[in-house]
Amino acid sequence: MMKFSTVITAVACAAGLLLQPGLAAAATAQAAPAPFEQPSQMIHSVANALLNEINGHRAELRAHPQQISAIIEKYLLPHFDSALAADLVLGRFGRHASAEQKERFVTAMRNALVKSYGTALLDFHSHMLTVYPTHLRPGTTSATVRTVLTETNGTRLPVDFYVLMTPSGWKVFDLVVEGVSYDMSYRAELAPQLQQVGLDTVIQRLAGGEKLTAPKPHPKRR
C-alpha cells in the first residue's frame, strides 16, 4: 500500500495542472447558465463519481494502470482551472511565455504527475474523505472548500480546495494540505530549473520522464 501522502499527491496532481487550456476555453464558451451550486457539492459529487468508477475496476486498473489517465480526464479535468494553476506555478517565468508554451507545459506536467502518482488513486476510498459544506450566497466568485482525508491509522489530514467561479461552474486552482500550497510547492521546485535552462528545456525534461517531488505537509501539524 502506498503512503497516504502519495494518495494526496494523486488527488492534488489532478487538481493543479491536468486540464489543457484549450479545453477549458471550449468548455467555458459552450456552457449554459446553471443554478447556483455550492462548491462543496461540486467536490463531493466529483469525488463520488470518481470513486464509483474506480470501485468497479480496481483490479483491472491495477493490472493496466495506463487506463487511469482516461478516468482522470473524464471525472476530474472538467473541474480544474489549469490555466490559472500554470500561471501560479510558473510565476514570473510565465509572464512572457506564449500560449503554445503554456499549453505544452500543462501537458508535460499533467503526464508527469499522472505517470508518477495516478495509481495512488486506487488506494483512495470514500470513507477517507470528509467534505464540509459551504454556505455561500449566489454571486460569490471565490471560496475555500475544507475537507479532511483520514489515513488508515486514523490520522486526519486537512485539505483545502481553493476554487473560483467561472462561466462553466466552480473550478479548483490549488490545494493546500496542512498549510502547504501545491501550486507554490511546484513553483519553488521548478524555479531554479526555469532560471538556469528556460521553460522549453523544463518542458522537455518533464515530457522525457523527469519526476517531481511530492509536496510534504508540515510534520508538526500531523
Image (cartoon, rainbow, N blue to C red):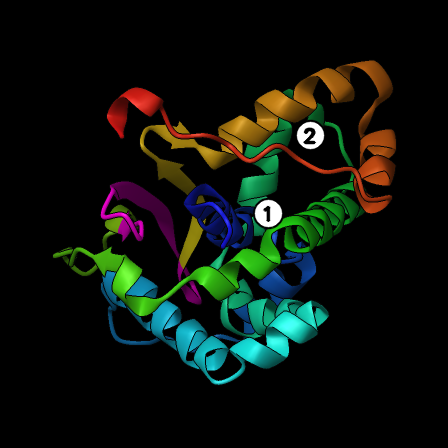
The foreground one among 129 and 87 is: 129
The residue beneath circle 2 is: 94
Image x and y of residue 73, in percent: 60, 69
Residue range highlighted in magenta? 149-170
The foreground one among 112 and 6 is: 6
- Asked which secondary structure carries label 2, the reply is helix
Asked if residue 13 is among those painted magenta in the image, a careful observer would answer no
Which residue lies at the image location 59% right of the left edge and 60% below the top edge?
Answer: 119
Which residue lies at the image location 52% right of the left edge and 67% below the top edge?
Answer: 78
Amino acid marked by disc 1? Ala
The reply, left or right, for residue 28 in relation to residue 62 is left
The residue beneath circle 1 is: 83
Image x and y of residue 201, in percent: 87, 31
For label 1, the crowd category at 10 Å Cα-Cα, with few meaning under 14, some 14 to 19 and many 20 or more, is: many
- What's the distance in space between the residues labelled 2 and 1, CA to CA? 11 Å
Asked if residue 160 is among those painted magenta in the image, a careful observer would answer yes
Please tell me in which quadrant of the rendered image residue 155 appears.
top left
For residue 72, above or below residue 83 = below
For residue 91, above or below residue 105 = above
Quarter placement of the C terminus: top left
Which residue lies at the image location 26% right of the left edge and 65% below the top edge?
Answer: 127
Please tell me in which quadrant of the rendered image residue 34 appears.
bottom left
For label 2, the crowd category at 10 Å Cα-Cα, with few meaning under 14, some 14 to 19 and many 20 or more, is: some
- Asked which secondary structure carries label 1, the reply is helix
The foreground one among 153 and 199 is: 153
Please tell me in which quadrant of the rendered image residue 129 appears.
bottom left
The foreground one among 131 and 139 is: 131
Specify whether residue 25 is in view: yes
Q: Main secondary structure of the magenta part?
A: strand
Image x and y of residue 190, in percent: 68, 25
